[in-house]
Amino acid sequence: MGFKKRSTKSEEEVLEGQTDLAADNTVSAPSSKKIKMIGKKDADMGDGVASSSVANSVKPMERKKKRKQVDKERQRSVLENEESQLKQPIIEPKGKDATEPVAASSSSSSPEFHISVFKDLASADSLVREAAVETIVTELQAVQKAYDRLENKDLVEGGLKLEAQKDDGLENCASSLGYAVRRLIRGVSSSRECVRQGFALGLTALVASIPSIKVDSLLKLIVNLLEVSSSMKGQEVRDCLLGRLFAYGAIARSDRLTKEWLSDKNTLLIKEFMSAIISLASKKRYLQEPSVSIILEIIEKLPAEALLDHILEAPGVPQWFEEAIDVGNPDALLLALKIHEKTSIDSKFGKLLPNPFCPSKLFSADYLSSISNCLKESTFCQPRVHSLWPVLVNILLPDTILQAEDAVSASNSLKKHKKGRKSSSSEEEIANNVQSFCDVVIERSLLLSSHDRKHLAFDVLLLLLPRLPSSFIPIVFSPKVVQCLIDILSTKDSWLYKVAQHFLNELLDWVRNDDVRRVAVIVAFQKHSNGKFDCITKTKTVKDLMAEFKTEAGCMLFVQNLINLFLDEGHASEEPSDQSQTTDENSEIGSIEDKDSIGIMGNADFLKGWVIESLPSVLKHLKLDPEAKFRVQKEILKFLSVQGLFSASLGNEVTSFELQEKFRWPKATTSTALCKMCIEQLQSLLANAQKVEEPRSLANGLEPNDLGSYFMRFFSTLRNIPSVSLFRTLSDDDKESVTKLLEMESKLYKEERNFRLSNDANKVRALRYLLILLLLQVLLRPGEFCDAASELTICCKKVFTAPDDLNLSGEDELDDDAAPELMDVLVDTLLSLLPQSSAPMRTAIEQVFRYFCGDVTDDGLMRMLRIIKKDLKPARHQEAGSEDDDDNDDDLLGIEEDEEEDEDMDEAETGETADSDEQSEDSEAVVGSEGADKDIPEDSDESDGGMDDDAMFRMDTYLAQIFKEKKNQAGGETAQSQLVLFKLRVLSLLEIYLHENRGKPQVLTVFSNLAQAFVNPHTTEGSEQLGQRIWGILQRKVFKEKKLPKDESIPLSTLESLLEKNLKLASKPFKRKKSASSLSKKKLTASLTRYKMIVSLAQNSIYWILKIIEARNLSDSELQGVFDLLQAVLEGYFDSKKSQIKSGVLKEIFRRNPRISRQLFGFLLENCGNAKSDFRRVEALDLVIEVLKSQVPMNSNESKRDASKKFLKSHLQSLGHLIETLVTKMPEKKSRKTEVHKCCDKIFQMITTLDLTKAFLKCLEPGTLSACESQLGPVFLKLKKLK
């Protein structure tokens, strides 16, 4: 290799990847088999530094540099002379019996060394490098053996002396071997491609295979050839230092040091080697860890007795250990731990290790604090974790002890909570060590320091996880660790965000298949974040973890831990991070804070609120058999009942001998807000249980798994315990209501068991659950549901109980003559419960209504519909001469047309405008024909006729409250929103009614009233949701329903009236106000959208009504009124500017109703020909073709052909008149001309198909024939030829 002149440059530290090369990529090859294994390691070596290395010996003085240049030239000539002289003595004495394989040249059998093999050592292909190493070793072994066999080495001594002028200790080596050793040493300092890896591999194999290479000579050569001078630049310094490191690594892996000790236990080579490598490690920080890695390889190969004298007593090693704590040297600590692990020596490390050494002292707070600098400085090798940490983790959490401990911990965790479980002394010691380690190292040293050290803290925690018992999770995931994780995850642009995310993903993988771990992690996260982990971090971590419980044991464990967390008074984190104030504010977006009562909670109550909400949600994704699920439900129900409904009068523990259970309460009194939350979750739990419970199986053959029944018995039992009282004091009326509800539920439960699995049993069950939820509602909102509870119990008695069992008090007795219908009372009661009930309560109401809606009377149905049509704004009574009222009444959608705008009929292409009609016509356009609804204003007192005062009071209690609130508030916004909410809940009942009463006449009543409510702008004012809800019900339950109300009791006149008004509504134009320009674009868009929805509703109503009429199979004479209505619409379509009915609607009517199209075809032809505008005439041609398609099918059998021919022949004259009009008044626009040609072509085809060409031509006047020829051209000429 050539020399390279170096220039001065400031020293820099190398990239951290080089440390990996130094630590891992130097290999040894004591035999040819080992060379292959070493080559595999070599294949994984990293990239080197990006500049060339020292090529030869470099001296600081210029004179020596010049001498080296001369040496290079001499070396080449001497090598040639040496090889030529070496061949002669080898051939003569060994020529006859030379049996050893050597690399021979083409002209002689003497061994040779091919220098070109060095090129293959630098190859990026590991296989090529391995082959090159084998070649080098084989050839040089042969050369050295030949050299050793020479008896007279004086013949080549001159060459050897020239090569050994530097006194490098290679006097006993052949010239080729000496050259190869020097070149390999120089090569390991090169960063080009894979030179360093390949040359280190070659040096390792060569030193291991040829004993002639002395270790002491190598150590001198490494220093001499890779000496660092002051004139070198930073990159060159790094290359030389890394070259030394790889060279030392080659010596270590060659096993020569071990062999030297085995042959001479007093050898000084190991001390010299240790001194050299410790000196190298002290030069640069990045050399420390790989240097220690090389030393550790030697330690593994040396016996323990050699370590004391040869390793620990080596020059520089004791001082290195002494300075380690002060300078923060993690590698010295690693070396000390490894040496102690093998020798159990305590006294040779100074303060670096505790004396005497034991795990409890190693992990004591004082010792860990003393070595904190060493631990913190281990971050220099990031992103890789320093080798020290796995060693510490192995000592902290030994395998054998922890496996046994984890099994015990898991079995105990799955059992019920037991106080005072004693653990073994070893477990306690390990727990104390882990506690001290996490406190001193993780929390106080790393987490409170730089970002790099926070990163290291999470890496160390990941090292702990595979060995960590579940019982230690609360220790490791301390408040500071969890808070640090939260702070990082809450800021996505944080430098550590990806680090925390990776840690969280690894943690989730670790707990995925272990319920004990999952429970411990969830509790730690929520406990130290006050129940806001997901809220603050904006993730679904806790939610996803909770959804992964699949077993009963896991669920029960989680429930028990949540209960303990609720009852624990010291759970709040006392040391929030600096960002805790910010994150607490940011976390106000979770599910719990949506509740008003939680908004004012403190952190402790927030966590308890999360516990309350989380318990029922465990069951959401749980798939267990009914009995297992029922057991989990019981545990949750008992907790919610005890904490939400009751309080202990004496102390915070009560034992029930009847239930054989002990119940606990928190030491601090539970707030009313939390009690309300418990009641709400209890309602939700019971409502969900009612939904999913199918025919109940008998538990142990004694009683069904009925959660509602279990709750009522549990409630009664606790209520009767003297030292337990309800969480709030009830009035006498509320107490009476609770008693009645308990008694009635008990009777219905017995009745249900008698009915078994019949429909009556389902009815009883629905009522029973409504009673249970109503009882909870009475406790939740006392004083508001007494009357409803009383009426509901009466209804239950009348529906299912025998008269003798009623035992009605005088107050409850009803006069049979004056009593309203039972179902009316039930409906009124349900309606009175709707406005202020919770979601589970509403679910129970809907369930009851579902089973009883088939018996609802027409009066009860109308009461529900009147609620939908109720309006806080009183109806305006139009006054004659009131110009403002006229304008307002004319405006259906809030936008009035510009009456001064000039119009002609051609403008109808883009939408005609016309004078507006009265709004009252709009609001009544789709209403039914009931006389009371037509004649009596909606807001009059008589609009609720047929209802007595009591019934009115029962139904309108909430409405009266809304009206009263509206008067007391400015604007009435709250009252309006409450009314809208009430209407939405009633709509849910109406949707159920339509579903359960499909095909009944009452569907028409519901349809007409809902349509009227939808069209009236004041009904849905301020709530787009209400309008969409009505629209959706009409679409799903009316228009798309296959079963039609075909009952003959529906008068045809009623259907005709509905049809007329919907036709009128479908024809109504969109009206623009003169002041429309001042309205916002949003309001204009909303008005236009509403107009389109109303028109669409009218169109669908027309199709649906005609479908009902058609299904009754009436005669043409009976349908004359329908024909007249549609004929009037057609007339308005052609003649009136006000009519905006779309041709597509008429076309759809004709397509769906062939009888109507046949009846009106003549009228259509006549009006089409007499139309005043070309636009209407051409547009109506589609209607003509549609009728002809339905009445004159092109592919029909003989019988239908005759009927079609008869139909078309009867209208030939009208068709001729239409053709005459079209050709004489041909439109000027090209598109319209095209439409006329298409229509005429289709008509001519139908005439030709039915052989009516001759009759048709006779109907045309001579002038018409010539006009047809000129205007229609080939289309008409083709018809004439067929004549």
Image (tube, grey):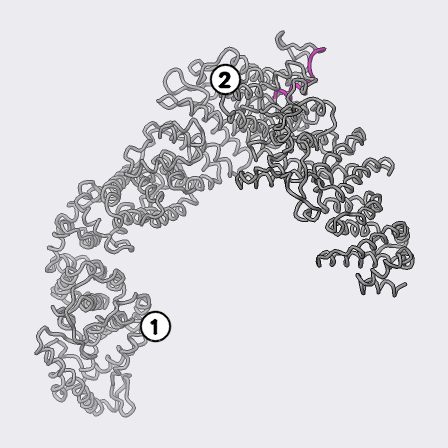
Q: Which residue appears at 25% of the width and 63% of the height?
A: 18
Q: Name the disc covering residue 125, or none.
A: 1
Q: Which residue appears at 27% of the width and 84% of the height?
A: 102
Q: Which residue is mark 2?
A: 782
Q: Which residues are magenta?
A: 817-829
Q: On screen, 43 above or below 481? A: below
Q: In terms of depth relative to the viewer, which is nearer, 1027 or 320?
A: 1027
Apparent side of residue 753 relative to residue 382 in the rendered image (left or right): right
Apparent side of residue 508 relative to residue 630 in the rendered image (left or right): left
Q: On screen, 1088 above or below 599? A: below
Locate the C terminus by quadrant.
bottom right
- Please rate how many residues cluster around mark 2, counting C-alpha atoms within 10 Å: few if below 14, some from 14 to 19, many from 20: some
The amino acid pointed to by label 1 is Asp
Q: Specify the quadrant of the image occupied by residue 820.
A: top right
Give the main secondary structure, helix, strand or loop, of the magenta stretch: helix
- Please rate how many residues cluster around mark 1, counting C-alpha atoms within 10 Å: few if below 14, some from 14 to 19, many from 20: some
Nearer the observer: mark 1 or 2; the answer is: 2
